[in-house]
């Protein structure tokens, strides 16, 4: 068997990565837990990459976690395991991490890779959407920051230019004692499973009035689904919700959820369960 030659680079600094990306189109690998599976070849053959590879998982510049001005900054190469053990990571995010695949994947997989893979079933994505996460990108021309809803444009499609690298994910710090979060992942088993669907939500209310509410659904459309228009219907409303308004919110989401049939589930099952999770949250939030 003739082995295919693959050019690869292992830069020793972030500046070297940026320099390399400015010179040629490369495939970037951090943990590789998605990339290697998607490009697998027959046993004994090299993975099927059609352009040079740049490995970045070893760069400490991309593995920092810190807070500045009420924002939590997470390096793109932070692994799920590292995040699960870090005191700055919110408990609800740690809960989602525990439901990602198995320990071996959590040891290698990275938050930046999960975002750039842009799977509709990505486990961390619904939470990142309700956090209004921002993505920091860097190139030789400078930096830019993009809202996650604008960065992820479709299945496996993100708004990253050829010479850019995702360096950080930025989350606004939300005091957990003042807001109610939920995250639910529905799959065939508790671990090592891809989501049939997922649901994340948060609500903040005070003195009988809703101050802020957010909902995000995974695996029920080409990207994570969130509707600020529907959320705004609840802002300022009396809490607990009356039945009429609760039913109206569920009906609104029923019209915009667009799941599909695939090997993991059916569109009907996904929509039914997603709406039940939404209704349960609206009925049980205290």
Image: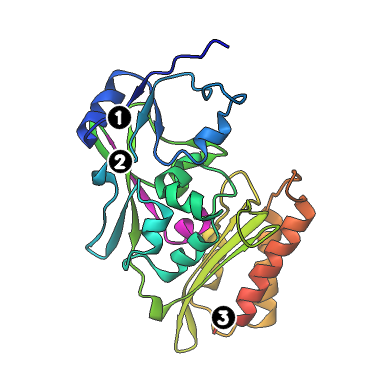
Locate residue 154 relative to residue 147 in the image: left or right.
right
* Mark whose residue sits in front, 3 or 1: 1
Dot 3 corresponds to which residue?
A: 285
Q: Residue at x 67, y 58 (%)?
A: 187
Locate residue 44 relative to residue 266 in the image: left or right.
left
Determine the secondary structure under disc 1: loop
Q: Say few, some or many: other residues with alpha carbon within 10 Å of mark 1 (under 14 / 14 to 19 / 20 or more).
A: some
* Residue 22 position within the rendered picture, expressed as x and y whole percent measured from the top left: 28, 23
* Residue 126 part of the magenta segment: yes
User: For the magenta stretch, what is the residue range?
Assistant: 125-138
Dot 1 corresponds to which residue?
A: 10
* Mark whose residue sits in front, 2 or 3: 2
Determine the residue located farthest toward the top in the rendered image.
Answer: 2
* Residue 113 part of the magenta segment: no
Contact, CB < 8 Å: mark 2 with mark 1?
A: yes
Q: Which mark is residue 58?
A: 2
* Residue 79 position within the rendered picture, expressed as x and y whole percent measured from the top left: 39, 51
Closer to us: 262 or 221:
262
Q: Say few, some or many: other residues with alpha carbon within 10 Å of mark 3 (under 14 / 14 to 19 / 20 or more).
A: some
Locate residue 82 relative to residue 94 in the image: left or right.
left
Q: Residue at x 50, y 55 (%)?
A: 103
Answer whether residue 142 is visible to the viewer in this image.
Answer: yes
Measure how far apart labels 2 and 1 are at the Cα level: 9 Å
Locate residue 252 relative to residue 72 in the image: left or right.
right
Determine the secondary structure under disc 3: loop
* Residue 234 position within the rendered picture, expressed as x and y whole percent measured from the top left: 54, 72
* Residue 80 position within the rendered picture, expressed as x and y whole percent measured from the top left: 43, 55
Contact, CB < 8 Å: mark 2 with mark 3?
A: no
Is residue 227 shown above or below 163? below
């Amino acid at each position: 068997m003739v082995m295919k030659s693959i050019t690869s680079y292992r830069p020793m600094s972030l500046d070297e990565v940026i320099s390399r990306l400015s010179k040629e189109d490369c495939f970037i690998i951090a943990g590789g837990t998605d990339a290697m599976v998607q490009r697998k070849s027959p046993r004994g053959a090299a993975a099927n990459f059609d352009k040079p590879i740049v490995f970045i998982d070893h760069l400490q510049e991309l593995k920092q976690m810190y807070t500045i001005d009420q924002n939590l900054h997470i390096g793109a190469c932070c692994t799920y395991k590292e995040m699960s053990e870090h005191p700055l990571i919110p408990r609800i995010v740690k809960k989602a991490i525990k439901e990602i695949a198995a320990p071996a994947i959590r040891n290698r997989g990275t938050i930046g890779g999960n975002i750039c893979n842009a799977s509709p079933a990505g486990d961390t994505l619904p939470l990142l959407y309700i956090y209004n996460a921002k993505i920091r990108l860097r190139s030789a021309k400078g930096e830019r920051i993009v809202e996650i809803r604008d960065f992820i444009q479709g299945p496996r499609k993100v708004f990253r230019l050829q010479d850019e690298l995702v360096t950080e994910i930025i989350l606004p710090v939300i005091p957990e004692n003042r807001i109610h979060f939920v995250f639910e992942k529905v799959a065939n088993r508790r671990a090592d499973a891809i989501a049939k669907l997922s649901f994340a939500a948060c609500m903040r209310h005070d003195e009988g009035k809703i101050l802020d509410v957010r909902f995000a659904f995974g695996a029920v459309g080409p990207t994570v689904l969130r509707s600020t228009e529907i959320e705004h219907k609840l802002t300022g409303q009396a809490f607990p919700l009356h039945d009429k308004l609760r039913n109206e919110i569920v009906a609104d989401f029923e019209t915009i959820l667009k799941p599909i049939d695939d090997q993991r589930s059916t569109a009907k099952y996904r929509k039914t369960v997603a709406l039940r999770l939404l209704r349960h949250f609206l009925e049980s939030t205290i």
